[in-house]
Image: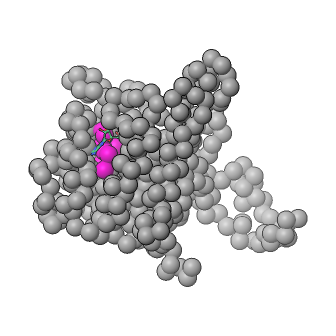
């Protein structure tokens, strides 16, 4: 499939030319709010992003305190809603945080969700939870020193949509069958009512290649020695401290967009989203404020940078007994739930 350019009508109001452009997309260095404001309405299929979090221990990129965070983010939310197509989705990966000096959690990410889903705004299509088995036991004071809290290893991911029926298909992904299910498929099953009253019919015996995944995504954090990091170190460019593992944008891009659709990351950082889109034949736009992060992101598109290996991904680690997540590209065209008689 030949790449398709992004129409000029979408980018003509941008303050500057792109920092770089590829076959499928372009990265712009600057404020995403300013860029979004100059875009026409209803032109984007998916906005997938990981915003700067309101963290207690500030990282070296712009975080605001938790209290001001929701007001700050709401402006971005309004613009995202305006530029999304009716069938579009807005996926936000957002980590939790602790109140300063206290073993008490901030509720800012839930407040943000409530703000973004208030009447007239967006719908919560589904909440996802990203479990990273490799997360460090922090905050150390509460988890490893006083031992009064457990390690915080889950990020929330809000899947928001403009209507209750964004285009989507869970058939695009499946998880390996459990041993019990494989046994059932091998040896058959007698259709009967369960003690719970559920009628288990013989259709359970059909091998569909895998089971429907749940809203718990198990992905470890990024490796410390990939191509992007090596190139950043070689050239003294800062490695982005909060990169997406590629499975996170990959999961939602695969489930919520078709080839040639337009995907946008408004807090692009090292541009994992653009890189995944490039390999999945989605058109993409990325906005990032910090020039150094933009520079580092160019390394992902060098000819020696490794390709995404097909679109089958291992998200679970064998040793923690999570099953493999598989992604496919069928159905060829995504349905909106409505058309299936819902
Ligand atoms: C959590 S990081 C995103 C990391 C990214 N997902 C990746 O894989 O590398 C958030 C990014 O948002 C950027 N940022 C903050 N405010 C911004 C704004 N108004 N416009 C564009 N980028 C912004 C920060 O510089 C930071 O790099």
Left or right: residue 66 compared with residue 278 = right
Q: Which residue occupies the foreground of this view, 212 or 74?
A: 74
Which residue appears at 31% of the width and 45% of the height?
Answer: 268
Q: Is residue 206 visible?
A: yes
**Residue 312 place in picture, x, y as percent:** 47, 50
Q: Which residue occupies the foreground of this view, 19 or 177?
A: 19
For residue 284, what is the image quadrant? Answer: bottom left
Magenta span includes 273: yes
Q: Outermost residue toward the front? A: 67
Which residue appears at 43% of the width and 55% of the height?
Answer: 91
**Residue 26 place in picture, x, y as percent:** 20, 51
Left or right: residue 241 compared with residue 114 = left
Q: Quadrant of ligand 1?
A: top left
**Residue 201 place in picture, x, y as percent:** 77, 72
Q: Is residue 281 visible?
A: no
**Residue 127 place in picture, x, y as percent:** 55, 55
Residue 28 drawn above or below residue 297 = below
Q: Which residue occupies the foreground of this view, 257 or 161?
A: 161
Q: Which residue occupies the foreground of this view, 280 or 152?
A: 152
What segment is highlighted magenta in the picture?
A: 266-274
Q: Outermost residue toward the right? A: 195
Left or right: residue 94 compared with residue 261 = right
- Prevailing secondary structure of the magenta residues: loop
- Total marks in image: 0
The quadrant the N terminus occupies is bottom left
Which residue appears at 22% of the width and 59% of the height?
Answer: 37
Which residue appears at 88% of the width and 65% of the height?
Answer: 195
The quadrant the C terminus occupies is bottom right
For residue 300, what is the image quadrant? Answer: top left
Magenta span includes 302: no
| Model colouring | one colour
């Amino acid at each position: 499939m030949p790449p398709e350019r992004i129409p000029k009508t979408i980018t003509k109001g941008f303050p500057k030319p792109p920092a770089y452009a590829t076959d499928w997309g372009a990265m712009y260095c600057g404020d995403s709010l300013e860029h979004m404001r100059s875009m026409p309405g209803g032109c984007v299929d998916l906005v997938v992003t990981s915003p700067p979090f309101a963290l207690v221990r500030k990282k070296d990129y712009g975080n605001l305190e938790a209290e001001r965070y929701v007001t700050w983010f709401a402006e971005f939310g309004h613009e995202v809603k305006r530029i999304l197509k009716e069938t579009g989705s807005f996926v936000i990966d957002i980590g939790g945080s602790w109140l300063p000096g206290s073993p008490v959690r901030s509720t800012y990410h839930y407040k943000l969700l409530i703000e973004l889903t208030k009447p007239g705004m967006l719908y919560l299509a589904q909440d996802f939870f990203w479990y990273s088995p490799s997360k460090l036991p922090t905050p150390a004071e509460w988890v490893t020193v006083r031992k009064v809290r457990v390690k915080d290893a889950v990020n929330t991911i809000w899947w928001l949509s403009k209507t209750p029926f964004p285009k989507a298909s869970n058939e695009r992904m499946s998880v390996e069958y459990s041993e019990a299910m494989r046994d059932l498929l091998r040896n058959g099953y007698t259709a009967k009512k369960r003690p719970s009253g559920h009628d288990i019919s013989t259709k359970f015996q059909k091998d569909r290649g895998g089971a429907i995944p749940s809203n718990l995504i198990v992905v470890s954090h990024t490796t410390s020695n990939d191509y992007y990091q090596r190139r950043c170190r070689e050239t003294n460019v800062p490695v982005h401290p909060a990169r997406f593992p590629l499975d996170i944008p990959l999961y939602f891009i695969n489930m919520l967009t078709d080839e040639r659709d337009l995907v946008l990351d408004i807090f692009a950082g090292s541009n994992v989203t653009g890189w995944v889109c490039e390999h999945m034949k989605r058109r993409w736009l990325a906005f990032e404020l910090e020039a150094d992060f933009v520079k580092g992101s160019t390394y992902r598109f060098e000819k020696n940078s490794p390709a995404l290996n097909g679109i089958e991904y291992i998200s679970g680690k064998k040793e923690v007994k999570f099953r493999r997540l598989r992604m496919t590209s069928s159905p060829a065209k995504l349905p909106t739930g409505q058309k299936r008689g819902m």
